[in-house]
Image (cartoon, helix red, strand yellow):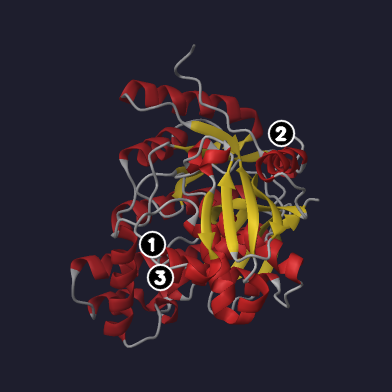
């Protein structure tokens, strides 16, 4: 086998979207599910670490989804099962996690994928729907969202089950409210201090669009992002370096941003104008705080630049903005890694590539590459060859096709 060949990731539509979870649910629990729901992972085009600073982001949903077959129970038991080895099970009956709804405890040190959907049930109870979810549920998960790749596999787990329970219990929750509930579950139950972007992207994105989200007032704008119409593609390159936000590095940067806002006398770094950045930096103490503030203020500005280019129909012009964004993530926020830098550096030297940057929380995960359709095979091969020469595992490469947000499949 050619080791320089990138691994391909199959999207959710590669098999019947609802048939497989339904059949597996039936075999596992001995009854029919009441429906099948799907929620996508996301890739972020621009605007990183800006969401918890009340700033701007621009994600798009992936075709890869977490799909849930669900049926309600009446005995207070929550049974959760994943048919995916990546989630830590073998797909067999022995992988069922059985919990009692009235005994769910935040910040369970035992860890595991199940904390994300269990946190949704807990959060619904805390937000006024305890009576509705008290009976429990049988849940079977089948996901095609790559885990540990910075593509919001955790948000897909949360939003998919939240939508299912909303529909089954006819809860008066719109999609933005579902996203907020899922963020609360991840913050308070799982213990990851994430912002609102991932859950909103999974819940609210539309096919063929990127989502401009103002994380202060949660106003949303769907921006057309039809790359084939421009002869372009957006590639995701998963470095296969494990992406994890629970090790304190994410929290440290969030705390540094909050310290920067405190020193500048603003509620959030969103309130620091780009044109006043130099003056603001001069008021700060602490080298890392200064770097974090510079990244957040300039990345908010970059979201505005990308929005302007897309509104003008000049998609190729966003390429240099992506490269600038990567440099800021690498040098100011310092959340890149050698594998991510190698993707961006290799892509930037390849004819037909307009820009590239790491995406997501960093410390591994994925990068995106904006490239002419005619150069997709070449850049994929060059990146894979560079990884092989450096002694890294072969990356996984696939197109980021702007897809629909969470929905019911059956």
Q: Are circles 1 and 3 on residues that touch, CB within 8 Å?
A: no
Residue 297 numbered mark, or none: 3
Of callouts 3 and 2, which one flags the residue occurring earlier in the amino acid sequence?
Answer: 2
Q: Are circles 3 and 2 on residues that touch, CB within 8 Å?
A: no
Between 345 and 10, the residue placed more toward the observer is: 10
Q: What element carries label 2?
A: helix
Please report the residue visible at 42 percent of the width from the left and 36 percent of the height from the top: 240
Residue 385 numbered mark, or none: none
Residue named by callout 1: 108
| Residue 281 x/y as whole percent | 27, 75
Which numbered mark, 3 or 2, is in the foreground of this view?
2
Q: What element carries label 1?
A: loop
Of callouts 2 and 1, which one flags the residue occurring earlier in the amino acid sequence?
Answer: 2
- Residues under labels 1 and 3: Cα distance? 35 Å
* Residue at the far bottom in the pictured view: 265
Q: Is residue 59 left or right of residue 339?
A: right
Residue 304 in view of the camera: no
Please report the residue visible at 42 percent of the width from the left and 74 percent of the height from the top: 274
For disc 3, the neighbor class at 10 Å (few under 14, some 14 to 19, many from 20) is many
Whether 388 is drawn above or below 360: the answer is above
Residue named by callout 2: 14
Across the whole image, how many numbered discs are drawn on residues? 3
Which numbered mark, 1 or 3, is in the foreground of this view?
1
| Residue 53 x/y as whole percent | 43, 74
| Residue 238 x/y as whole percent | 48, 38
């Amino acid at each position: 086998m050619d080791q320089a060949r990138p691994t391909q990731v199959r999207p959710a539509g590669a098999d019947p979207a609802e048939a497989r979870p339904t059949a597996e649910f039936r075999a596992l629990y001995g009854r029919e599910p009441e429906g099948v729901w799907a929620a996508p992972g996301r890739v972020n085009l621009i605007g990183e670490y800006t969401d918890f600073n009340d700033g701007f982001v621009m994600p798009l949903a992936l075709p890869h989804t977490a799909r849930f077959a669900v049926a309600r129970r009446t005995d207070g038991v929550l049974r959760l099962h994943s048919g995916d080895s990546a989630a830590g099970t073998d797909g067999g009956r022995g992988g069922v996690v059985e919990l009692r709804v009235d005994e769910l405890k935040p910040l369970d040190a035992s860890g595991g994928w199940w904390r994300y959907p269990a946190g949704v049930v807990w959060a619904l109870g805390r937000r006024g729907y305890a009576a509705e979810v008290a009976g429990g549920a049988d849940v079977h998960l089948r996901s095609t969202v790559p885990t540990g790749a910075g593509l919001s596999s955790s948000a897909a787990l949360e939003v998919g089950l939240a939508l299912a329970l909303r529909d089954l219990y006819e809860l008066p929750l719109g999609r933005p409210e579902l996203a907020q509930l899922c963020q609360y579950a991840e913050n308070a139950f799982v213990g990851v201090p994430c912002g609102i972007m991932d859950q909103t992207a999974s819940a609210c994105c539309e096919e063929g669009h990127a989502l401009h989200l103002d994380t202060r007032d949660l106003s949303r704008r769907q921006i057309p992002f039809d790359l084939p119409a421009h002869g372009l593609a957006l590639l995701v390159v998963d470095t296969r370096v494990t992406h994890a936000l629970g090790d304190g590095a994410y929290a440290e940067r969030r705390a540094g941003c909050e310290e920067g806002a405190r020193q500048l006398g603003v509620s959030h770094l969103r309130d620091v104008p780009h044109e006043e950045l130099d003056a603001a930096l001069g008021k700060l103490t602490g080298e890392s705080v200064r770097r974090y503030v510079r990244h957040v203020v300039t990345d908010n500005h970059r979201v505005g630049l990308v929005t302007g280019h897309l509104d003008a129909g000049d998609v190729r012009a966003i390429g240099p903005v992506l490269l600038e964004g990567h440099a800021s993530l690498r040098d100011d926020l310092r959340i890149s890694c050698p594998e991510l830098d190698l993707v961006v550096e290799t892509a930037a030297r390849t004819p037909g590539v307009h820009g590239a940057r790491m995406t997501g929380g960093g410390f591994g995960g994925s990068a995106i590459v904006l490239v002419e359709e005619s150069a997709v095979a070449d850049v994929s091969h060059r990146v894979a060859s560079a990884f092989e020469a450096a002694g890294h595992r072969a990356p996984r490469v696939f197109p980021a096709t702007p897809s629909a947000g969470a929905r019911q499949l059956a």
